[in-house]
Amino acid sequence: MSQKLNFVLFLVTSIFYAQPDTEVYLFNVNSTKKGISLELVSNISNNPGYDNQPYFYNDNIIIYAATQGDQTEIAKYNLRDKKTTVLSQTPNGSEYSPTKIPEQKAVSAIRLGKDGTQLLYKYDFTSGKSDVLIDSLKVGYHSWYTKDIVICAVLVEDRMDLYSYNIKRKSKRLLDKNVGRSIHKIPNSSLISYISKENKLWEIRNINPISGERSKIINTITNNEDMCWLNNGTILLPVKNRIYYFNPQQDTTWNILTTFKEDNLHSITRITTNEIGNLLALVSETSPEKVVQQQLDAYNNRDIEAFAAAFSEDVEVYNFPNQLQLKGRDKLKNAYDEFFKNTPNLHCILQNRIVHDNKVIDEELVTINDTEISAVAIYEVTNGKISKVTFIR
């Protein structure tokens, strides 16, 4: 297998399979003479697993990718009755990046088939009936320019390239190379914005898909690529627990809009607004503290499945300072499964906890049969899973 093919498979895996435990949160956007403020309404997904990629179908309905069993489907959340229904129930694949198709009662989404196929589909908004929209490109992300033209980030070799695709003519046009996942129609304009990864510092660029003329708007912050536009021409960009804003017509640099104090809003990624700009939805990973607490609860309950699920597939377990004990979730699961079965009296009491960024440091008192052991565990959480543990005894 070639190196390039290996990379493409890795890219597909990173987009669709390395899914952290995330939730979708709804906010009111309040505009005053002093500026913009955000008011948290609710966690609209409230569902274990991957809930991501929200999009306002209209001012009353949000569509997003939601975990349903062992698959990801298109969910519809109704703001009025606060109920969620599932639009797609595909037996042979999962859906991602749902987006409203202009001038139609339909949604487009990327379907990743169990056989490895990855195509852009159209779904009837009422029945969920689906048809292939593009069968010639491996689309990673997309945004509609008109009812017939869709702008796509397409997997090509070891990167994603930006294409426009005419659905009626079945014709494609290369717009730029090496782009990110955030593609948006710029309000009140004929331009599309996208993330260019051509240079070391990533850029937000705009382009006219018809003429091909493009220009730089501003660099992103520390290579963050998720953003959205307010209808007044302001860009919002989340970085960890902060949201920054930049208006190309007024500002010369990024400014802080808000810093969230809530633990569940510590690592924000996707962000989107409705058309009139009074509602906002964003995605945040489960906080590192919650992830660590879940594995501690599972440990005390001897729930080996829940315990192992808190760890990444390539988790590393060390004794201080750097003595590797085991690597991989399967090995960890086998070791602890045997340990749980052979230890009748087993319990861990949390005596003290410190949380800093993605690290959780626990001082623990562990009872193993008739022996009490004091220990410190340093957990590192990446993408909603424990990726490294170091024990100090």
Image (cartoon, rainbow, N blue to C red):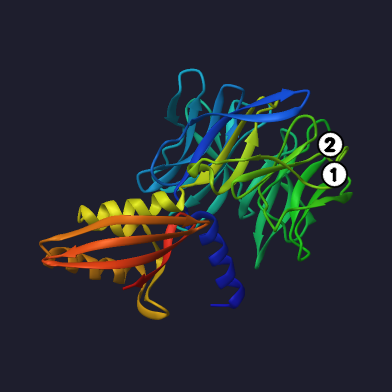
In what element is the residue under mark 1?
A: loop
Percent coordinates x, y for residue 375 in the rendering: 30, 67
Q: CA distance from mark 1 to mark 2?
A: 6 Å
The answer to whether residue 150 of the structure is visible from this angle is no
**Is residue 54 or residue 40 the one in the foreground?**
40
In the image: residue 31, left or right of residue 387: right
List x then y, in percent, for residue 266. Answer: 54, 47
- Find residue 92 and name its label: none
| Residue type pointed to by label 1 | Asn
**Dot 2: element:** loop
Residue 337 visible in rendering: yes
Q: Which residue is mark 1?
A: 208
- The residue drawn where x is 58% and y is 46% is 268
Of residue 211 and residue 371, the one placed in the foreground of this image is 371
Q: Residue at x 60, y 50 (%)?
A: 240
**Image spot of residue 275 (x, y percent):** 69, 27
> Few, some or many C-alpha atoms within 10 Å of disc 1 (few <14, some 14-19, many ≥20)?
some
Q: Quadrant of the C terminus?
A: bottom left
**Number of numbered labels in the structure image:** 2
- Tell me whether circle 1 and circle 2 mark residues in contact (CB < 8 Å): yes
Q: Residue at x 59, y 46 (%)?
A: 241
Q: Between residues 224 and 106, which one lies in front from this camera angle?
A: 224
Q: Residues within 10 Å of mark 2 (few under 14, many from 20)?
A: some
Q: Earlier in the sequence, mark 1 or mark 2?
A: 2
Viewed as shown, does residue 217 lie left or right of 311?
right
Q: Amino acid at mark 2?
A: Ser
- For residue 246, what is the image quadrant? top right
Q: Kindly identify which residue carries mark 2.
A: 190
On screen, residue 128 above or below 241: above
User: Quick one: 350 or 72, which is closer to the camera?
Assistant: 350
Q: Is 19 left, or right, of 275 in this rendering?
A: left
